Image (cartoon, rainbow, N blue to C red):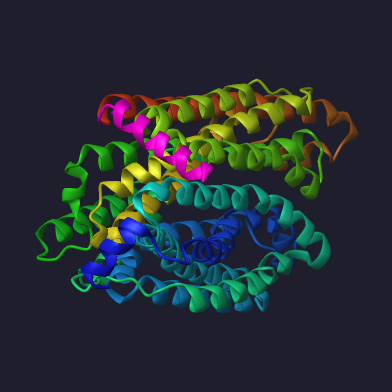
Amino acid sequence: MAAAESARDDEEGHPRRWSILVALCAALLVIVMDNTVVNVAIPAIGQAFDASTAGLQAVIDAYVVVFAGLLVAAGVASDRYGHRRTVLVGLVVFGLASVAALAAWSVWWLIAMRAVMGVGAALIMPATLAVLVHAFPTGERPKAFAVWAAVASVAMAVGPVAGGALVAAWSWGGVFLINIPIVAVALVGIARLVPNFRDDNARRLDIGGAALVTVGMVALTTAIITLGETGAGSPLVPVAASIALVALGVFGWRQYHAAAPMVDFTLYRDRAFAGASAAAALLTLGTGSVLFVLLQYLQLVRGHTALQAGLAIIPLALGTVAGSTVGSRAPARIGARRSIMLGFAVTASGFVVLATLTPASSYVTVAIGLVLAGSGTGFSSPATYSTVLGAVPQSRAGMGSALNDTHQQLGTALGVAILGSLLAVVYRAGLPGSIPEDAGRSLAASLAYSSTDTDKAALAEAARTAFTEAQTVTLLTAAGCALAGATIAAFVLHPDNLQANSTAAEKEDQTSGQ
């Protein structure tokens, strides 16, 4: 798009910008919900294909890791070929892969289709944020980002609820069937409403670099998960770690020496971009493991069904919406840095509340912890997005949004790997010595072992207690990650300009009153 038109849009905004936001949120809804909706279907998938635990883990990980690994390349493609075109291609890929997943005849075909869905999601995600940067004027972007963040968080929280209902109605295939109508609606809306913003001077795609960073991330998460499962004695740990080190090292070297790198590392010299990105990555490192832990607690410790467990997560979505609503105005009133620090601190307090859970705890404790965690995350999101993307030249909006998404997706993937491994290690250490090693690999395995003999009922209770103790350690670590993010924001981001913020808030109030 021409520079003059971009400048005009930055001052006035696109006339259909709020309709554009709705269409983009439909695309965002389906790719974010897919992060959690499949988790509830895992038992049904295991029964349908007689899949091993490793195979079921691969069903989940194939999507997230490919998604995260290709985000930067997708951001470059978005800048180069146009944001609308990239979103449309991503939706088509995602939709076709969902249809193919419905026809899966083996768990390996399902894993492959989940990876292809990750390709589609990677094409969609950075382009949605880049369109918002172009379509909304600077003053309205925090509101747009707040809506975007609220939809993303609600989709993440609604995933378990939708998954439980869909599995009950259509077995495991329901979690893929639901994607098709949402993709169709998003395709029509985006094709009709969204201009094809693009950068005529965008960098060239580096397919080799994209492959290297994806392989490196897959190897890194594999090494971490294996370390937590089998310990350092497994030969897979050093092999996977070496592959990750080499692949990511070569990727960095290629980007540093390339005439037109896919990743502009000079962006990290900006305190706002680097500080807010690091803070966001640390927060998602903690939040990425919370649903993973809590859904096991609710189903295996509290005895909820999949649908009941999904419904129990709703306070997280409610808190996120409420926090995003307030957080959209917070940067103009108290400054972006204070907004990030306060939001992260509230999220950490939610994790601390959840860390107090025991097998006999009231659901009220779960709800309070989830509301606090969601409110803090929602409150800080608009300030975080505005700070990161505000430090990126508009012509590199696709790259900037892709890097922002990569930081958070990688934080989520590593959160599940690292904190999930911590959960497993502490859980096994707390089990009675009479439980065999195979039965101690997970709480589900321990409960299955204890159910084989009525005299082993006490072992089931001991296993549930060991899990909640491990959960406490894990969630306190998650709280520490959130507080570390707040600390980075405090010391790295520039101090807030309260006078400028006050003026902006007054203008916003005058505009709202008209």
- Asked whether residue 464 is drawn in magenta, I would say no
Magenta-highlighted residues = 494-514
Inspect this view and state whether residue 133 appears.
yes
Q: Residue at x 72, y 22 (%)?
A: 358
Name the spot of residue 255 as percent of width and height, x first. Answer: 17, 59
Picture coordinates of residue 155, whole percent (x, y): 61, 53
43 to 210, vertically: above or below: above
User: Height in image: 66 above or below 511?
Assistant: below
> Who is closer to the viewer here, 49 or 377?
377
- Residue drawn 52% across and 71% down? 112
Query: For the image shown, how many numbered marks are present on the structure?
Result: 0
Label the magenta part by its dominant secondary structure: helix
Using the rendered image of the protein, determine whether residue 313 is visible from the camera's viewpoint.
no
Locate the N terminus by quadrant. Answer: bottom left
- Farthest front residue in view: 514
Quadrant in the picture for residue 216: bottom left
Is 351 above or below relative to 42?
above
Q: Estimate the x, y position of residue 44 in percent, counting from the top left.
A: 74, 60
Is residue 22 found left or right of 317 in the rendered image? left
Pick the front one: 229 or 249: 249
Query: Is residue 351 shown left or right of residue 466?
Result: left
Residue 469 in the image: x percent, y percent? Answer: 64, 23
Q: Residue at x 29, y 68 (%)?
A: 79
**Which residue occupies the foreground of this view, 456 or 30?**
30
Tell me where residue 260 sits by quadrant: bottom left
**Location of residue 273 (image quadrant):** top left
**Residue 501 on the magenta segment:** yes
Residue drawn at point x = 69 percent, y = 51 percent = 160
